Amino acid sequence: MRPTKADLEAARDRVIPDVLPEVPGTLRVLFCGINPGLYSGATGRHFARPGNRFWPALHLSGFTDRRLHPSEQVLLPGYGLGITNLAPRTTARADELTDAELREGGRRLAALVERHRPACLAVAGVTAYRTAFGRPRTRIGPQDEDFGPARLWVLPNPSGLNASWPLDRIAAEFARLREAAEALRAS
């Protein structure tokens, strides 16, 4: 059942728990969104809005053997995947976050990566990454620097509002990341 307008408004400033494995060191890729939207806050699920392309891209890129529904996010650790966000609180739009919140999220993310030691960290949202880490020239794709113990990758924002990145291009970038993560695991 879809959340009502009242459900969405009541979800403002909620926090959705990260999806992480029980055992640190078993993550291939930790996906990091900007922050949960109200739809995600109302459902308690990451990337939950029906127009979000995260779940389709995850499947089309080969990370999962089928398209998972946001309600199945608990299955991600079994694939060696996890989800977190730069800013934990839900908002209607990412531009409601302050630069200070994004920078604080970057510090929290660094601690999370040190603790869980993913092979790759994939930040979904280049503009938020630029702000959180003071890297104004960052582009989509693998980065020249690592993020602690993780190989750093910046992905396009999978939001349906990001019209400059259609699903096939997002899935292709996810596939490049998957291939890199598999190569790291094999080495």
Image: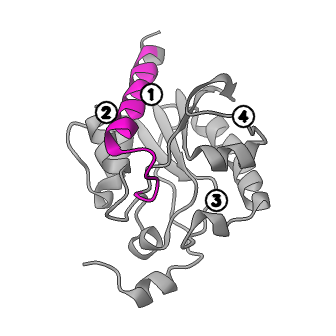
- Please tell me which residue is depicted at 20% across the width and 42% down the height of the picture: 66
Q: Could you tell me if the residues under marks 3 and 2 are in contact, i.e. CB atoms within 8 Å?
A: no
Q: Is residue 121 above or below residue 44?
A: above
Residue 35, given in percent of the width and then of the height, sits at 57, 60
User: In the rendered image, which residue does mark 3 sit on?
Assistant: 87
Q: Which residue is mark 4?
A: 137
For label 4, count other residues whose C-alpha is less than 10 Å away and answer few (under 14), some (14-19) or many (20+): few
Residue placed under numbered mark 2 in the picture:
61
Q: Closest to the observer: 43 or 23?
A: 43
The disc, 1 or 3, on the residue closer to the chain's N-terminal end is 3
Q: Is residue 27 visible?
A: no
Query: Mark 1 = which residue?
Result: 177
Image position, residue 147 (x, y; %) = 67, 31
Query: Label 3 vs label 4: CA separation?
Result: 21 Å
Distance CA(mark 3)–CA(mark 2): 26 Å
Circle 3 packing at 10 Å, graded few (<14), some (14-19), many (20+), is many
Which kind of residue does numbered mark 1 sit on?
Answer: Leu
Looking at marks 3 and 4 on the same chain, the residue that comes earlier in the sequence is marked by: 3
Name the amino acid, label 4: Arg
Q: Earlier in the sequence, mark 4 or mark 1?
A: 4
Q: Measuring 75% from the left and 37% from the top, which residue is drawn there? A: 135
Depth order, front residue of 154/25? 154
Q: Nearer the viewer, mark 3 or mark 2?
A: 2
**Magenta-tinted stretch:** 160-183
Magenta span dominant secondary structure: helix
Q: Secondary structure at mark 3?
A: loop
Q: Residue furthest bottom?
A: 6
Q: Disc 1 vs disc 2: Cβ atoms closer than 8 Å?
A: yes
Q: Quadrant of residue 34?
A: bottom right
